[in-house]
Image: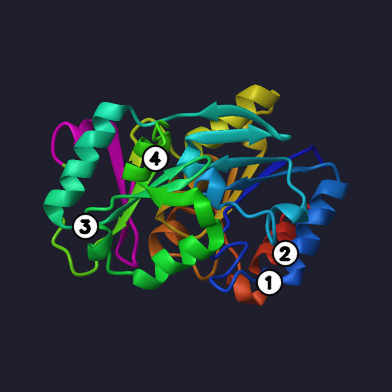
């Protein structure tokens, strides 16, 4: 078989909320690489949120993170698109006006706003981030006190308990809004997506987009599943993702990733 490049989402595709990865998924990725195929992580998480364990220690050829705003190939960073300071200031003001606490996601750290952190509804999630990241999870204000730039790729926040109706100028010209079934909103620079991330990798590596395979489950996977040579939706994925995919595999907990790789003869 001609060498393929496979892009795999993390959450609910490779790994569940307990940070557990099916043994079959690990075996499938290793066998793909042994066959000469390339396997990349392609995630909405910013780079700092892609853990060495249990994810990267499996072995990958690169990472597309922050919904395409960051790209790393064989350990070297080729793309790290940052939100301009003026847009950041407008975004902070918007979330304060809406009474919503945002998470500002960058390559080296995650940031929150001290003025709205008490309004974030998902307190358990904040605790999880602090536990996971330690001093890489800090406030916008602390980052400024350190006299360091914000360096943010994307923004996310929860609509639970809020009345957010959507972005207005000038933010709607800069961001693309991704709404998930579980009330989370991601704000991604408009010219970036997991789909553009795949295109960037292919161009850098001289690989035809027709030789790509993308596997995911949620709305931020839409462009990569539509744009890849073969788009695969997990059985536990959203209905919209299943409808745009070329193939729907079993749910993650039923060895869906392995079975998809097997179905397309990649093992």
State how far apart marks 1 and 3 are (Cα): 37 Å
The magenta stretch is 168-187
Residue that numbered label 4 is attached to: 143
Residue 265 in percent (x, y) is at: 78, 54
Q: Are marks 1 and 4 in contact (CB under 8 Å)?
A: no
The quadrant of the image that shows the C terminus is bottom right
Badge 1 or badge 3: first in the primary sequence: 3
Mark 3: secondary structure:
loop
Residue 100: which numbered mark, if any? Answer: 3
Mark 1: secondary structure:
loop
Residue 67 relative to residue 159: left or right: right
Residue 141 relative to residue 211: left or right: left
Residue that numbered label 1 is attached to: 255
Q: Are marks 2 and 3 in contact (CB under 8 Å)?
A: no
Inspect the magenta stretch and tell me whether residue 125 lies in it.
no
Name the one closer to the observer, 96 or 38.
96
Residue 186 relative to residue 15: left or right: left
State how far apart marks 1 and 4 are (Cα): 42 Å
Mark 4: secondary structure:
helix
Q: Which residue is painted at 40% across and 31% down in the image?
A: 147
Neighbourhood count class around disc 4 (C-alpha, 10 Å): few under 14, some 14–19, many 20 upward = some
Badge 2 or badge 3: first in the primary sequence: 2
Foreground: disc 1 or disc 4:
4
Q: Quadrant of residue 263?
A: bottom right
Residue 25: which numbered mark, if any? Answer: 2
Q: Is residue 202 visible?
A: yes
Q: Are marks 1 and 2 in contact (CB under 8 Å)?
A: yes
Q: Is residue 34 above or below residue 175?
A: below
State how far apart marks 2 and 3 are (Cα): 37 Å
């Amino acid at each position: 078989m001609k060498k393929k490049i496979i892009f795999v989402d993390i959450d609910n595709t490779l790994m569940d909320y307990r940070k557990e990865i099916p043994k079959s998924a690990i075996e499938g990725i290793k066998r793909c690489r042994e066959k000469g195929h390339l396997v990349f992580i392609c995630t909405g998480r910013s780079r700092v949120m892609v853990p060495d364990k249990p994810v990267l220690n499996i072995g990958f050829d690169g990472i597309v993170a922050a919904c395409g705003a960051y790209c790393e190939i064989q350990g070297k960073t080729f793309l790290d698109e940052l939100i301009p300071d003026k847009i950041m200031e407008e975004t902070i003001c918007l979330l304060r006006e809406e009474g919503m606490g945002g998470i500002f996601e960058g390559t080296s750290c995650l940031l929150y706003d001290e003025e709205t952190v008490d309004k974030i509804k998902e307190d358990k999630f904040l605790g999880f981030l602090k536990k996971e990241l330690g001093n890489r999870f800090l406030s916008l204000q602390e980052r400024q006190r350190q006299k360091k730039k914000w360096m943010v790729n994307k923004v996310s926040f929860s609509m639970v308990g809020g009345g957010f109706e959507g972005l207005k100028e000038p933010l709607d010209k800069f961001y693309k809004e991704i709404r998930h079934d579980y009330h989370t909103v991601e704000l991604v620079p408009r010219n970036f997506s997991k789909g553009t991330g795949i295109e960037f990798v292919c161009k850098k590596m001289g690989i035809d987009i027709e030789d790509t395979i993308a596997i995911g489950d949620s709305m931020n996977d839409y462009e990569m599943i539509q744009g890849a040579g073969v788009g695969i939706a997990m059985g536990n994925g959203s209905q919209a993702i299943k409808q745009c995919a070329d193939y729907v595999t079993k749910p993650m907990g039923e060895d869906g990733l392995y079975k998809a790789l097997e179905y397309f003869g990649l093992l």
